[in-house]
Amino acid sequence: MIWAYPNVTLITVLAVIFGLLYLAYLYRFWKINRKLKVKKHRLLTKLTLRVVYFGLFLVALAGPSIGTGTKEIKQEGKDIFIAIDLSRSMNATDIGPSRLQRIKYELKDLVKNFSTDRIGFIIFSSEAFVQCPLTFDQNVIQLHLDGLNTGLVPNYGTDLAAPLTMALKKFRNDENQDPKSKSIILISDGEDFAGELNPILDDLNDEGIRVFSLGVGTEAGSTIPRGNGVVIDESNNQPAISKLSTKTLKKIATETNGQYFELSDQAQEIPQLITTIERIEGTVKGSKTVEASANKYFYFLLVALGFAVIDMILPLRTISM
């Protein structure tokens, strides 16, 4: 027999508590009825009944699995490029401690959910660069993730078409051309100062590559720290305010059959993003057969409840009249 939750300490504690409480009950019963004639065999029957169904409750709690069987598990894989905006506006603090630091924290958990998939990083601002090629190595991925900062790329505005073009190029040139699911997670505050998006969106559609965009920031926005001061808007000589712009990000997601998600003061949609990508059918890389057994706790619980009901509706008389 296999136990799903073999917590011996918990079960022992519960059994001891039950024993102490029941001994207190018996002592109280004896004090009240010590001058009366008590049929001891009925008292013993009631005690046995309660011990049995409490024991069955403990067995059910431990989750007994009886019997053995086998189950085939398919191992699927996807290719995912994560494109991360490293323009200076990602240092804005409308999401603490900053947009980029919050993304780095969230991505640590996100990539762990795709341990059987190949993941790569593309960093961009006015230009795009491959920081980490597609790999299964989670340690390498986490290492590159830790090193993300806005000083890694030239900062002359943001071009959202650049990382999409780079990801498409890398997908096409990949040595492993087996049919597989290909996706891009585009992370940005949505500010786009560059050119036309339609050509690259058409190419992504032709290749069946879906883009899931993640907008980071708030509608109110905030100033952008730089050194001991803030970035200044040269047009008015005032501190520049960076705000979340969702229009372009939503367009990219919609036109590539993807979906838009948001990380802001109003929405925390990283879990939904993870769930959506997990639902994408990947390429079957192989399968393995594992032993499986069914948890039979329900039968023990049902019998215990039956005894408990009998104890309540058919009380045994312990005092002779």
Image (cartoon, rainbow, N blue to C red):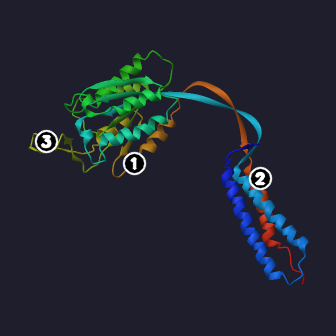
- What's under tag 1, amino acid-wise? Gln
Instruction: Give the distance between the C-alpha atoms of the residues marked 3 and 1, in whole angstroms.
Output: 30 Å
**Could you tell which of marks 3 and 1 lies nearer the N-terminus?**
3
Q: Are marks 3 and 1 in contact (CB under 8 Å)?
A: no
Q: Which residue is mark 1?
A: 268
Residue drawn at (74%, 64%), measured in percent from left and top? Answer: 19
Residue 103 in sight from this viewpoint: yes
Residue drawn at (78%, 71%), measured in percent from left and top? Answer: 312
Q: Are marks 3 and 2 in contact (CB under 8 Å)?
A: no
- What's under tag 3, amino acid-wise? Ile
Residue 149 in the image: state x and y as whole percent. Answer: 29, 33
Whether residue 32 is situated above or below residue 80 in the rendered picture: below
**Could you tell which of marks 2 and 1 lies nearer the N-terminus?**
1
Q: Which residue is mark 2?
A: 299
Q: Quadrant of the N terminus?
A: top right
What kind of element bears circle 3?
A: strand
Question: Splitting the image into 4 quarters, where does residue 258 fall?
Answer: top left
Residue 209 in sight from this viewpoint: no
What kind of element bears circle 1?
A: loop
* Residue 232's disc number: 3
